[in-house]
Amino acid sequence: MRIIVNGTPREVVATTLAGALEEVGIVGRFATAVNGVFVPAAGREIALSEGDAVEALAPMQGG
């Protein structure tokens, strides 16, 4: 399935957000959104559809 991950088109076999993130090598602590809607870590088993836009952002320290 073709999705967009952080602005880059990607081809993935996974059908869930969690699986797709793992497949493209995004692991650790991060915030996620699908099509602009925040998805908490506990909800990452949601199904993805062709063309979905996934964003994964790591927390940053600073001030």
Image: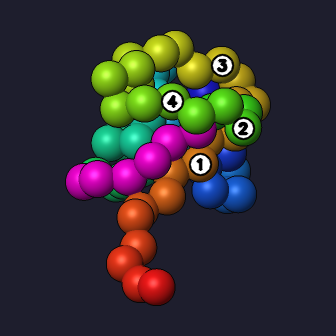
Q: CA distance from mark 3 to mark 4?
A: 15 Å
Towards the viewer: 52 or 38: 38
Residue situated furthest left in the rendering:
28
Residue at mark 3: 49
Question: Amino acid under label 3?
Answer: Ser
Q: Nearer the viewer, mark 3 or mark 2?
A: 2
Q: Nearer the viewer, mark 3 or mark 1?
A: 1
Q: Residue 30 got which mark?
A: none
If you read the primary sequence from the N terminus, does the residue marked by circle 4 or circle 1 appear first? 4
Q: Residue 55 got which mark?
A: 1
Q: CA distance from mark 3 to mark 2?
A: 14 Å
Q: Residues within 10 Å of mark 3 (few under 14, many from 20)?
A: few
Instruction: Tell me if label 1 and label 2 are in contact, CB under 8 Å.
Output: yes
Question: Amino acid under label 4?
Answer: Val
Residue at mark 2: 36
Q: Residues within 10 Å of mark 4 (few under 14, many from 20)?
A: some
Question: Amino acid under label 2?
Answer: Gly
Residue situated furthest front in the rendering:
63
Q: Is residue 8 left or right of residue 16?
A: right
Residue at mark 4: 39
The residues colored magenta run 28-33
Quick one: SS at disc 3? loop
Towards the viewer: 57 or 61: 61
Residue at 58% x, 34% y is: 38
Q: CA distance from mark 4 to mark 1?
A: 10 Å
Instruction: Tell me if label 3 and label 1 are in contact, CB under 8 Å.
Output: no
If you read the primary sequence from the N terminus, does the residue marked by circle 3 or circle 2 appear first? 2
Quick one: SS at disc 1? strand
